[in-house]
Image (cartoon, helix red, strand yellow):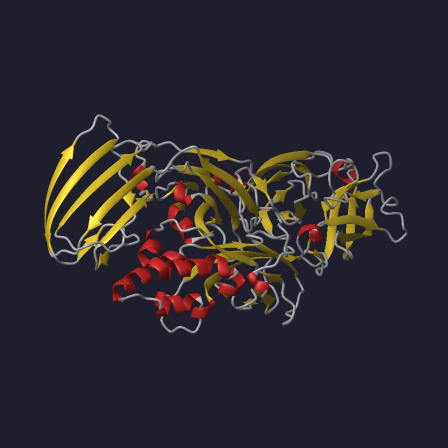
Amino acid sequence: MNANNYFDNERPNNNNNNYIIDFKRQLQNHIVVHFLPPLVQATVLENATAIQSVPIAKIRANISMAPAFNTSLFDRLELSSNQIRSQLTTTKSSSQLFQIEFYLLNHHNTFAISRQSGEIFLKQALANYSYVIDVRTVISLREQTNSTNNSNQIQFTTQVPVLVDVIDINNSEPESVKNVLNCLAYDNIDVYTPICTASFKDGDRGINAELSYSILSLDDSDGRTNNVRIDPKSGSIYRRSADVPMLPGEFSEIILATDHGSPYLETSINSRFKIMSSNETSNKGFNERPYFLDQTKLRSPIALTGNEKPGESIANLTPFDPDGNTPTIYIVNGDPDGLFAIDDGVLIIAKSIDFSEKKTFNLTLTLTDGIERNYLNMTIIVPKIVRSIPNKFYNTTISMSNSAIAKSGSKLIDLSRFAYDTSYAKYKLYSASNQYAYMAFGVDEYSGIVTLTKTIDFRFNGRHSLMFGIEDNRLSLENYRSFVELSIEVKLVVPAPPSTTTTSTSTTTSTTTTTSTTTTTPTPAPSSTSTTTTTTTTPRPTTAGTTAATTAIPPSTTTTTTTTTTTTARPHSSSTPIVFRPTVSKTISSTTLRTTTTTPVPTYPITMFPAFETTNFEISDITPRYPPPLIPPTTSIADK
């Protein structure tokens, strides 16, 4: 007979209906599910297309039954509950007894999931580089799936995260922010001052967006003929040699930008150079120094917004020469990576700036007419703008032991160590391996401290798995979250139960009314008591406190009972309460003579150990596991 038949048919009488409902609720709290791996990761190419028959990931789960924490319900249900428990824990495997269903909680337009197998499929092209998929899982008895009354079904609902990382494809060529690069310099420029800087951008990310620069001369001299060179990393163009004169005049070079993708992509633009003679300025006689018209304003710090792109203007430098000479501006210090450039008297963004960290650039600009020079110090403040964070997965284990109980409010571990930025982090209990773990543990949303929300004792012993999510207030939860799997090994001390032995010899007669007179004779030994009871009765059925094999004796109206009880002192304090399992009474319809030996087995409430208040916790070293294997070789219910 299956478990569902027991629930529906094995009810001794209506008085046990409530017990059976309680038993169902108790049973669903004992369902334990472990996902393999606990966090599923998938990698998808940026240009991947939806293929209906090819999943990008699969969720696997192992389901089991935990031992009952409170066995009193089984005792109350007597035979029926014991048969159910045996059926659930020994007769059937979890894959036969339970079924698991999967449901997407977000990204419905981009992904789909098989409700039975847990396979995840791609529905459309991916627009982002990272996704966090929340999958709800519902575990229930297979025999209940067609039931219309969901309120009495045995179910356990939890969720599992799936991280999808999109691999960038090198499909964007480098792009120059200007069609032609115009470079202006005097013939006496030194070899350390950049004449101009090439400005390119790339629509890819990571290594595919990193660029290298080179000069392609028409005579294959790589700029040696015109005495110029280019920094391959920054794209800044310099005078090649101080020993070779820069001849006044104009010439052109081809600037080539190549990305680091595989296969690589490249783009070239034409650059025009105009080299002016410094002698023309000196031949005019008296010469005044050029200057910046808004020099006071330009000395004030300039804060970027974080949205600037290559080619955008930062400040108009407004150079002025009183003699009418052509002033030129160079960035001589503070920009080794060539992030900024001068374009026709305007300071612009030359390359994509990393806004993930706050930075300050102290630029030194020089303004010259070939003879006289003027300097300007500018401060550019780059704010910290977090547009993405790495989605990481960590796992760690703590142990709770050396105590009889662990009290509510006990601190277990601080999760803030796993946060990308604690100033913006929020912590949430994402899932748990069983319902009891949901009820017993919690985390502070802002501090990340995990605590006990319930007082627990040895009945909670075992391994409990919790999954915590770490969010960032600045970013979308749909795309960016990190997770910490916390395995808690509970090893609380199991108290020794009291040892009690009772030997009873009695003569019993069916009675209607009873009048008792009891005389107690004390004995020297404190652990032994002798009691003689004389009872005068008239015939009626009576109820004995215990049941045993019966033997008929002649009818009588007087019963004499002699009871000798030997008690072994329990190891706990006498003030400690003991709760015994209830004893089922049965009516004896005939006169019996019986001999019974009984050993009561107590159950302990949580308040059993008020003297134990300390709990020792051992926190293991953090072992980041990123990324975990996507599909480990294991058999699970999802494969059935």
Q: Position of residue 109 (x, y in %)?
A: 53, 69
Q: List the single residue furthest toward the right.
A: 219
507 sits to left or right of 637: left
Q: Quadrant of residue 150?
A: bottom left
Q: Is residue 83 above or below residue 249?
A: below
70 sits to left or right of 372: left
Q: Position of residue 377 (x, y in %)?
A: 60, 35
Q: Position of residue 189 (x, y in %)?
A: 77, 37
Q: List the single residue furthest toward the front.
A: 554
The C terminus: image quadrant: bottom right
Q: Quadrant of residue 333?
A: top right
Q: Position of residue 26 (x, y in %)?
A: 36, 56
149 sits to left or right of 589: right
Q: How many marks?
A: 0
> Relative to the observer, which residue lies in front, 457 or 263?
457
Q: Is residue 107 above or below residue 188?
A: below
Please indicate, yes or no, whether residue 443 appears anywhere in the rendered image.
Answer: no
The N terminus: image quadrant: bottom left
Q: Residue at x 77, y 53 (%)?
A: 258
Q: Quadrant of residue 146?
A: bottom left
Q: Residue at x 28, y 54 (%)?
A: 550
Q: Residue at x 14, y 53 (%)?
A: 556
> Relative to the observer, which residue lies in front, 317 or 535?
535
Q: List the single residue furthest toward the top.
A: 524
Please indicate, yes or no, whether residue 205 appears anywhere in the rendered image.
Answer: yes
> Relative to the observer, which residue lies in front, 374 or 206?
206
